[in-house]
Image (cartoon, rainbow, N blue to C red):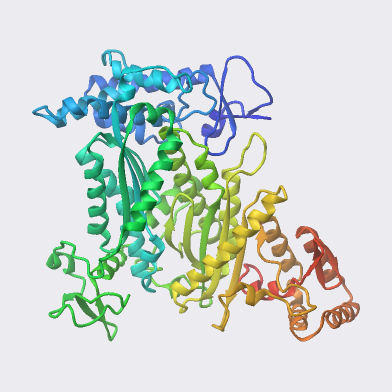
């Protein structure tokens, strides 16, 4: 087992690896990748001292915002920026959370413990501020004062399994858990890109901004343990949880109109918060499941307060006089309330589609593009220019009329989450995976599109990816994302994969309804995940890819089994799904036979028209007429890359014959460099 240098990973300086433990170093295991890290005690103390000094200055200046920046907005690789993400070292703990995770949780606990006396204060906001400052600074800055509650919080964290008795252990706090549900149903209620993009933006606004604002307004920032990917969890004073659940559900309805949500609250003894995280989560999930089963979505015609004059100003929309006469021309599920004439066509939208349309208008991608530009500028040292309203329509994203709908999902994520045993660990896991996935997507897009940001990011959650990209780049972009994801979450100590990603890619004409393309991408993802499970059973932990190119809509195009079954006595029609190494092998194969497209096409037709024996004879006859042996040698390399061996015109894997020619022709026109 090897140990990886934490400082080297963060800054590129210092010792990169160690073969064994040495004195004068701290060692711990990462919660996400299980990689074993080390840092010298000297480096740790230097960074720790820099953070303490910065916090002391904030304390002297009564600068709460400065404290928040230290803990929650670290940027750069200087010592002060690294302080919050240092591992919080506790004796006997092999897996460590970051200092910022520890501080957030202990402050939430302190607030829950003190709330009973605070709410009787004439100035509760001043009391909240005092609690926050003490929670953030205690243990780091002298002069903050004694805090018996935090002392017990620290001791309870260190007493796991020791059965110690503490005064605060019987005190109760409310745990709130929940989020939006049936998210893809909300995205894909229509086929119009502005409304799909708008739905994504509205949900992101709720999950990443509005929930935190609501918690901060009613309680304190630290009460929110995590929010992202449509889910949230919070620790609140006893009796406050139900109010937050109602506020969150009102918030989701107010901002999105028809997105569904499910939140629940339950009181737990403080001792369980420290020592029974998984038990609490299981109880909360059961409550949510029961609650969801009892709920009935009655909002066919939702009533959300809004200011039509202000909202519709400058949009071209006007309110309809009779709001219960015409159905929405976009979703066709609800009555229209507003209309406008555009390009000779009259749009009539319900309130939900109207909200989506306005959110997904011309400026909808500006935030995503700005994040992308910032990433490229910081990581690649390059600039990305976007001209006016470019890439607002699918035909602008398409190349030669085709787009790629990419849907990705992580494998074994739930298994890793189930191994976490504290709220701090869940906070660390949630933030780390969310930030990493967005960086991976941006990097893959830049690698394949360079300065041309011709893409639409519909959703990038903690383990969920939904993109629309040019059809010719979709295969390469999906491979880049999947390989980088596997690499980012690799256990570097054991040099083995941990959490991996599977991808489904549907390449189709931009006029194809997105709902239909996404449905196929979902089926492809399911097929890819089955492949990942099978490979894992063989001891090969890897991400996987399945894809389909649809040039003409045809019966059964969404039925993978119908598409891929071979006739009686014939080899299987396709090698798909692929592992990443198999995807590379196919790309190498296509480049090797680039000059032989007509011959490859003939071999593809032979699969359809001939029996297995006739196709083999045809292949051998045609090969014998050729002066070079590029096709045969390419077949041998492809077979090796696929984990099998070439037998005439087919590849034999685990006793079953597969034909590579249908795959080759189907992807040929959608592979870069095959012109």
Q: Is residue 100 visible from the viewing direction of this image? A: no
Identify which residue is drawn at 45% across, 34% down. 425
Closest to the observer, 258 or 156:
156
Identify which residue is drawn at 68% across, 23% down. 20
Q: Position of residue 521 (x, y in %)?
A: 53, 67
Determine which quarter of the picture holds residue 504.
Answer: bottom right
The answer to whether 115 appears left or right of 70 in the picture is left
**Quadrant including the N terminus:** top right
In the depicted structure, whether residue 362 falls above or below residue 46: below
Q: Position of residue 506 (x, y in %)?
A: 55, 70
In the depicted structure, whether residue 219 falls above or below residue 388: above
Determine which quarter of the picture holds residue 474.
Answer: bottom right
**Quadrant including the C terminus:** bottom right
Closest to the observer, 271 or 34:
271
The answer to whether 415 appears left or right of 314 in the picture is right
Closest to the observer, 437 or 672:
437
Give the number of marks: 0
Q: Is residue 77 visible from the viewing direction of this image? A: yes
Q: Position of residue 508 (x, y in %)?
A: 53, 75
Looking at this view, name the residue that lies furthest to the left. Answer: 122
Determine which quarter of the picture holds residue 587.
Answer: bottom right
Looking at this view, name the residue that lies furthest to the right. Answer: 624
Q: Position of residue 102 (x, y in %)?
A: 39, 28
In the depicted structure, whether residue 320 falls above or below residue 634: below
The answer to whether 283 appears left or right of 349 in the picture is right
């Amino acid at each position: 087992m090897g140990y990886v240098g934490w400082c080297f990973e963060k800054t590129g300086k210092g010792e990169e690896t160690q073969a064994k433990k040495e004195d004068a170093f701290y060692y711990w295991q990462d919660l996400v990748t299980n990689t074993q890290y080390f840092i010298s005690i000297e480096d740790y103390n230097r960074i720790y001292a820099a953070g303490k000094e910065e916090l002391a200055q904030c304390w002297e200046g009564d600068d709460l915002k400065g404290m928040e920046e230290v803990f929650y907005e670290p940027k750069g690789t200087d010592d002060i920026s690294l302080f919050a993400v240092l591992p919080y070292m506790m004796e006997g703990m092999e897996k460590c959370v970051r200092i910022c995770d520890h501080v957030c949780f202990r402050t939430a606990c302190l607030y829950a413990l003190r709330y009973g006396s605070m709410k009787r204060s004439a100035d509760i906001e001043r009391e909240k501020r005092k609690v926050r400052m003490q929670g953030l600074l205690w243990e780091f800055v002298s002069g903050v004062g004694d805090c018996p509650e935090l002392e017990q919080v620290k001791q309870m964290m260190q007493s796991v399994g020791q059965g110690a008795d503490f005064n605060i252990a019987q005190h109760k706090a409310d745990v709130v858990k929940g989020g939006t549900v049936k998210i893809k149903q909300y995205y894909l209620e229509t086929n119009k890109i502005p409304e799909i993009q708008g739905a994504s933006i509205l949900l992101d606004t709720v999950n990443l901004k509005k929930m935190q604002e609501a918690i901060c307004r009613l309680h304190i920032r630290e009460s929110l343990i995590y929010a992202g990917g449509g889910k949230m969890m919070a620790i609140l004073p006893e009796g406050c949880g139900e109010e937050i659940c109602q506020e969150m559900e009102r918030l989701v309805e107010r901002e999105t109109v028809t997105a569904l949500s499910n939140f629940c609250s339950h009181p737990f003894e403080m001792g369980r918060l420290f020592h029974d995280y998984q038990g609490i989560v299981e109880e909360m999930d059961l409550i949510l499941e029961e609650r969801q089963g009892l709920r009935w979505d009655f909002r066919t015609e939702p009533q959300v307060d809004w200011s039509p004059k202000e909202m519709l100003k400058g949009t071209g929309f006007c309110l309809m006089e009779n709001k219960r006469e015409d159905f929405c021309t976009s979703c066709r599920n609800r009555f229209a309330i507003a209309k406008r004439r555009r390009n000779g066509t009259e749009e009539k939208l319900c309130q939900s589609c109207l909200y989506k349309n306005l959110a997904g208008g011309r400026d909808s991608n500006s935030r995503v593009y700005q994040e992308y530009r910032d990433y490229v500028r910081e990581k690649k040292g390059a600039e990305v220019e976007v001209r006016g309203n470019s890439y607002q329509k699918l035909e602008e994203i398409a190349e030669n009329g085709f787009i790629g709908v990419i849907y990705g999902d992580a494998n074994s994520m739930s298994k890793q989450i189930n191994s976490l045993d504290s709220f701090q660990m869940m906070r660390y896991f949630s933030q780390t995976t969310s930030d990493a996935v967005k960086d991976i997507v941006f990097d893959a897009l830049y690698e394949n599109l360079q300065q041309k940001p011709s893409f639409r990011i519909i959703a990038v959650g903690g383990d969920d990816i939904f993109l629309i990209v040019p059809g010719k780049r979709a295969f390469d972009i999906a491979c880049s994302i999947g390989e980088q994801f596997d690499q980012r979450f690799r256990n570097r100590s054991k040099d083995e994969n941990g959490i991996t990603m599977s991808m489904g890619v549907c390449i189709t004409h931009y006029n194809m309804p997105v709902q239909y393309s996404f449905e196929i991408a979902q089926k492809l993802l399911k097929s890819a995940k089955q492949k990942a499970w099978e490979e894992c059973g063989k001891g090969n932990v890897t991400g996987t890819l399945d894809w389909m190119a649809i040039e003409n809509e045809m019966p059964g195009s969404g039925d993978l089994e119908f598409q891929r079954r071979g006739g009686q006595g014939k080899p299987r029609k396709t090698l798909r799904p692929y592992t990443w190494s198999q995807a590379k092998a196919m790309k190498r194969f296509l480049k090797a036979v680039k000059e032989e497209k007509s011959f490859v096409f003939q071999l593809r037709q032979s699969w359809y028209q001939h029996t297995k024996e006739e196709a083999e004879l045809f292949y051998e006859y045609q090969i014998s007429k050729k002066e070079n042996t590029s096709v045969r040698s390419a077949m041998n390399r492809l077979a090796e890359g696929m984990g099998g061996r070439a037998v005439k015109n087919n590849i034999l894997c685990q006793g079953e014959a597969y034909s590579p020619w249908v795959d080759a022709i189907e992807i040929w026109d959608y592979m870069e460099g095959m012109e």
